[in-house]
Image (cartoon, grey):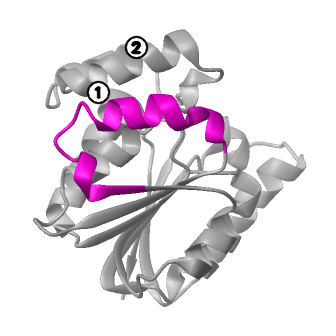
Amino acid sequence: MDILPNALLAYLDDHCDPEPEALQKLNRETHIKVLKPHMLSGHYQGRLLSFLSKMVQPKRILEIGTFTGYSAICLAEGLAEDGILHTIEVNREMEEIINSHFKLTNVENKIKLHFGQAEAIIADLQEDIFDLVFIDADKKNNYTYFQLVFDKVRSGGLIIIDNVLWKGKVYGPEKDADTEGIRKLNNEIAVDSRIEKLILPVRDGLLVIRKK
């Protein structure tokens, strides 16, 4: 779901780096074969995730919510030479499309794909510290995931949370459970003195958090 006008979105796409060919193919296949293709990060947001990752040059990335693998590929572009990205997906039906497109990129060997419930997988991971975490899974658990990973993120590391503007509902009159849950997340993050934070109006809203 995009919150910006289509004309502006097209302008932004035209004035950032082009979408890599492998990601163009994944974008098309997701829209042809997968339900709810709007969940894909897409060209502009993907370039932003790649840009942030390249700025951090992380050795360890954690992604919660793989979907078809687009955002994982973008984030992996910024990994250090010996870096690893762990990505967690609850829906095993995505396995074929994810793995087939990881193989079309030059980051295949840097990505470790996990299937199952995020809380259990995170508890079992051998990694102690992450430089960057991207949360883009079931929205009702966003704050739970934030709390779960916080101590695993190094000082100066980033936590990025997607869909925090929730189709504009968070600043409207809506009172449904999902909207209230995202409002709670945003409100809790806003007053957390352990972090610096900024919501970017990209796609459905990206919350970028830097741990002090």
Q: Going by the image, does 37 lie left or right of 128?
A: right
Residue type at tag 2: Arg
Q: Can residue 40 be seen by looking at this rendering?
A: no
Q: At which x and y percent is residue 198?
A: 42, 63
Q: At which x and y percent is residue 92?
A: 63, 41
Q: Are marks 1 and 2 in contact (CB under 8 Å)?
A: no
Is residue 108 shown in magenta?
yes
Q: Foreground residue, 145 or 14?
A: 145
Q: Is residue 11 above or below residue 193?
A: above
* Tag shown at residue 28: 2
Residue drawn where x is 81% and y is 56% of the image: 180
Is residue 168 shown in magenta?
no
Q: Give the overall secondary structure of the magenta segment.
A: helix
Q: Foreground residue, 90 or 51?
A: 90
Q: Is residue 161 above or below residue 132?
A: above
Q: Foreground residue, 104 or 52?
A: 104
Tally of numbered tags: 2
Residue drawn where x is 16% and y is 67% of the image: 57
Q: At which x and y percent is residue 18?
A: 16, 25
Element type at mark 2: helix
For the N terminus, the quadrant is top right
Q: Which residues are magenta?
A: 91-112
Residue type at tag 1: Leu
- Sequence order check: which comes first, mark 1 or mark 2? 1
Element type at mark 1: helix
Image quadrant of residue 33? top right
Residue where numbered disc 1 is placed:
23
Q: Residues within 10 Å of mark 2 (few under 14, many from 20)?
A: few
Residue drawn where x is 44% and y is 71% of the image: 197
Q: Going by the image, does 108 lie left or right of 1?
A: left
Q: Can residue 171 be seen by looking at this rendering?
A: yes
Q: Going by the image, does 89 lie left or right of 206?
A: right
